[in-house]
Amino acid sequence: MKQTQAVGIDLGTTYSCIAWLNEHGHPVTIPNQEGELATPSVVFFDDNEPIVGTEALRNAIARPERVVQNAKRHMGDPERFWRIDANRYNPVQISGLILRKLIAAAQDQVGEINEAVVTVPAQFSDAQRHATVTAGHSAGLEKVEVINEPVAAALCHVLGNEGLAFTELAIDQQLLVYDLGGGTLDLAIVSYSSDQVRVVASDGDLELGGLDWTQVLVDIAAERFLSDFKEDPRQDPHSHQFLALEAEQAKRSLSVRPRAAVTVQHEGNRRTYQIEQEEFEHLGRSLLKRSNAITRRILADNGFGWAHVDVVLTTGGSSRMPMVRESLRKLSGRTLNSSLSPDQSIAHGAAYYAGMLLANQEYTRTIFNSQASTRLAQIKQQSVNARGLGILIRDAETGNRVPHYLIPPNTPLPASVTHVFGTVVDQQTKVHIRIVESGAGPGKPHTILGDCDITDLPTNLPEGSEVEVMISYDGQARVHVSARELKSGRSAETEIIRQENMSGQLQQEVEDVIQVAPPAQPVKVPRPGKAAARDRVEASPSPTTKTALSDEWAVVSARLSELSELSDSVDHAEQPVLLCNSCGTALSPKGKCPACDAAPKKRKQRAGVKKKAVQRTSPPKSSAAGTAPAKRKRKKTPTREAAGKSTNKQRSSEDDFWDLVD
Ligand code: ADP
Ligand code: MG
């Protein structure tokens, strides 16, 4: 039996933090080797020896081409990598190095660590969750679980505030968790009662965070410098990096002072500019608007008004900015609860979750005292998926593939959907399905999660044979697929071939050809097809390398197209037809059944025969994830009785006003 600890890691875009639960079940942040509680998520390759943290950040000015920052913004993107000398690093490898640093320091202090819970933004796709788990494995962890960041914050609030002495929570409350970090905004509506923390809905923006506010200051100072010296410091990596660090410091100062200084140095010139908080707030307005729109959206989309929110809980380093706090206070019409540590609460929540997962295991009592292990075993958490999950189906008219979503966003997890497909040719032995998730918000393109090959079908199937496919999300919104041929009842082999693996082959070919080292900017490997050559030329570091590269690139480009055509032809022949679960008729591109829509009454009768399409899957016994099915109906305004039980319900006519606005 392996000894382990309950460890939670907040793998942030800008800062990362690791915590463990001590024997009393209290989360404790573990400092890194430099004694810091939060480690900058920055890697510096010093002659290929990776250095992580503050020391890496320091080198960002002198040697920006050897420093990688903000890798989390590219997590799950198979086309992103940074090239340092002859080596190429993708976001998973960079994240793995950051995790390794945190874990190494923690092991020195608390003993061997074989497993951990790593936090992810709620909006992360399956591919991004998968990439995070892979990063954990590459850092030497045997087992990696993920938890959504706002859920971790909610656990920290519930167990930290109310559960220190592990007393029972007396009330049911609805929290709105607002987590504004360095790279992302994460929101969740969380409902909690005595032993259950249940996410009702989550939303957010993967491209809105403190970095964007820092950029506002960079732009203000750079524009002033440009007008004074006719030179733009953003054009030079060294000057730009120097300015970015200055702006970061100034941003923090502006959280406590009315003005701050930003020094710009570029091409032998140096000047310091004073920036007023008012100007910063004025130029940051569009960012606040985005944040407010998402906050309104999560409530409106889920039938909530402000009157249904008992506590607005803020966390994330950027929630320290007065303009953010003021804007949220005005929007919600209530006092914000800022009791959580913006820097440590997510890691602490993850450590609680790690403790909950360990609480059912036999050796728990060797790491927690009995009071702690009893309480951790009692608490249950349940999350929802942030994105819709479905498949690509072919539009018969245009020939284009369009997404057809089978599990909508904000379905309680775990969840599964079963759908019937028809084979397209006689004796088809293999079915090929492309699985998609909706984008990280309205208007954002869907992402192809991977291809699923269902092989091993009986050899004598006639055209139109029915294959039932079950696609499911587990408790942590990771995707699984299983399939069954209906006539024989035989299960078929299934495997999701993920995007990163599909493009791995392409990248290898690219790797074989490109020998010239570009700067340590994220470099995009072009998608197969026409854009390839053009993209590559844009990424070329200097005119001298362009000619050589374009010749080589023509070779890569041709090969990429070849591979792409090959995979398309396989796809076409084996792509099944989506059938109506009720009557077996082929569905339209929009997933509508022409037969059932024409005869809605009949459909109703038939629908009773088949199972409900989306269903919650029973949680595995050993897991703490998943409890009772969630109600997703609009919640009525709390009754007087319920309000009477609440400790901090301050209802006013303002609440009702916001209700009406929603
Ligand atoms: P992440 O986990 O995404 O890296 P964190 O929650 O650790 O994010 O927050 C880091 C962000 O918070 C950075 O963008 C940092 O600039 C910002 N931040 C930290 N302290 C302050 C402050 N006092 N004022 C304004 N921004 C801050
Ligand atoms: Mg963080």
Image (spheres, rainbow, N blue to C red):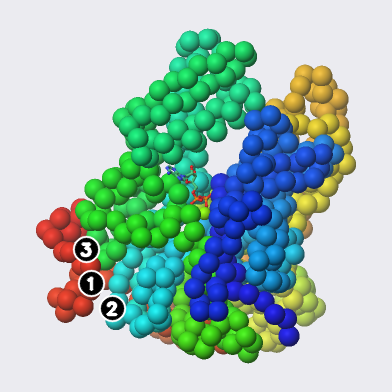
> Of 550 and 220, which appears nearest the observer?
220
Q: CA distance from mark 3 to mark 2?
A: 16 Å
Image height of 153 relative to 504, above or below: below
Mark 1 and mark 2 in contact (Cβ < 8 Å)? yes
Q: Name the kind of residue labelled 2 in the image.
A: Ile
Please give the label number shown on residue 363: none
Per the image, the residue denoted by label 2 is 171
Residue 399 visible within the image? no
SS of the residue under disc 3: helix
Q: Name the kind of residue labelled 3 in the image.
A: Ala
Q: Name the kind of residue labelled 1 in the image.
A: Thr
Q: Residue at x 51, y 23 (%)?
A: 263
Q: Is mark 3 within 8 Å of ligand 1?
A: no
Q: Earlier in the sequence, mark 3 or mark 2?
A: 2
Residue 650 visible within the image? yes
Q: Residue at x 56, y 65 (%)?
A: 19
> Of 422 and 114, which appears nearest the observer?
114
SS of the residue under disc 2: loop
User: Would residue 547 be found to the left or right of residue 592 on screen?
Assistant: right
From the top left corner, tell me how far across and down residue 428 is, in percent: 76, 71
Please give the label number shown on residue 647: 1
Per the image, the residue denoted by label 3 is 307
How crowded pointer 1 is (Cα within 10 Å; few <14, some 14-19, many 20+) is rated as few
Q: Earlier in the sequence, mark 3 or mark 1?
A: 3
- Where is the C terminus found, in terms of image quarters? bottom left
Q: CA distance from mark 2 to mark 1?
A: 8 Å
Q: Residue at x 83, y 28 (%)?
A: 549
How crowded pointer 2 is (Cα within 10 Å; few <14, some 14-19, many 20+) is rated as some
From the top left corner, tell me how far across and down residue 565 is, in percent: 77, 48
User: Would residue 32 be found to the left or right of residue 590 on screen?
Assistant: right
Q: Earlier in the sequence, mark 2 or mark 1?
A: 2
> Of 156 and 444, which appears nearest the observer?
156
